[in-house]
Amino acid sequence: MTAKRLSVDQRSSFSRLFPFLCLLIIGILWGATIPLTKIAVSTGHHSFGLIVWQLAIAAILLGVIVVIRRSVIHLTPRYLVYYAVIAISGTLMPNSISYWTAFHLPAGVMALIIAVVPVFSMLIAASLGFERATRARLLGIALGGVAIAMIVLPESSLPDPAKAVFVLIGLLAPLCYGAEGNYVAQRQPPEAGPFATLFAASVIGLLLLFPIGWASGTLIDMSQALGRPEWALIISSLLHVVAYCGYLWLTKFAGAVFAAQVAYVATPAGVVIAIVVLGEEPSLFIWLALALLMIGIALVQPKRSDDAQ
């Protein structure tokens, strides 16, 4: 009887810890994509060529998921516009900026820049009246600004102080993600499933960018022997799809507020993996900026009641 009760208690403990374990794994996978991106751009591959392959890999994986799940892909004008906006604001624009700035900035700094997404998302939502700008949230936005200032202003913050301008340019990427998040929250069609949406957006993004990459000669020939940057691109794209699908599943399984905490894992993971894999040595200002961003993210997170929305 005691052994049976212990077994039940163990299963109960595991069920409570399971969402946290998933959150940890998803965050680490997402964080790992940032140093991999740094490797992918190390030889000067153009962002267009990198994004084309990223979209192609995503479309193949998501296409398999869509077929297995028998997801319906709606092709009415309303849905096509929705897919196109997600493709442009969620991939083409921010990834073009991220790949370009990743060539100039340490991966650890890129991880901090991406962590600003919740701050921008809250700022946009509050300015448009979608969310209430409480004192705590305004403080979180302010801390995000201070964190970025600690990366840009001190001369000892970056390995090359002249690269500080790329931090400001890089902020356009989380701004795009923040705008995309608000667009999805307000304009998502009622029957737009997440996997079907991501698949359709990947295909549309590919159709939009491939001709540009072809005409500009920026496509990457993957038929030759693949080097470290090309493998980094492939692995990063795979991890991104897996992490994103895991995030969507976790949102449904444990709620949007809980799933949003993935930022607490992804950002530090990106910094630590960059140290281990790339040998980066973040300055004290970078560590302080990381701490401020973590606090800022906590303050701008949606209230628990928002889960029901």
Image (spheres, rainbow, N blue to C red):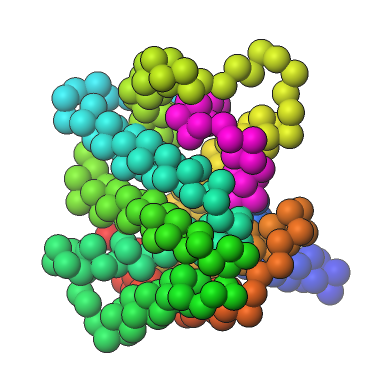
Identify the image quadrant of the C terminus.
bottom left
Residue at 32 percent across and 64 percent down: it is 120
Q: Tell me the quadrant of the picture where the N terminus can be found.
A: bottom right
Q: Is residue 262 above or below residue 186?
A: below
**Residue 194 visible in this rendered orientation of the protein:** no
Closest to the observer, 33 or 187: 33
Q: Main secondary structure of the magenta part?
A: helix
Residue 42 left/right relative to 168: right
- What is the magenta range? 33-61
Seen at 70% across and 32% down, the residue is 231
Tell me residue 284's x, y (percent): 63, 80
User: Which of the two residues, 14 or 300, is positioned nearer the viewer here?
Assistant: 300
Q: Position of residue 158 (x, y in %)?
A: 58, 67
The correct choice, above or below, for 49 with respect to 35 in the image is above
What residue is at 84 percent from the left and 74 percent from the top?
Answer: 2
Instruction: Tell whether position 50 is magenta.
Output: yes
- Relative vertical location of residue 222 with respect to residue 167 in this rendering, above or below: above
Q: Position of residue 61 (x, y in %)?
A: 55, 27
Name of the residue lying farthest toward the right: 3
* Residue nearest the observer in this picture, 7 or 90: 90
Q: Residue at x 64, y 41 (%)?
A: 42
User: Residue 36 location in percent, x, y?
Assistant: 65, 45
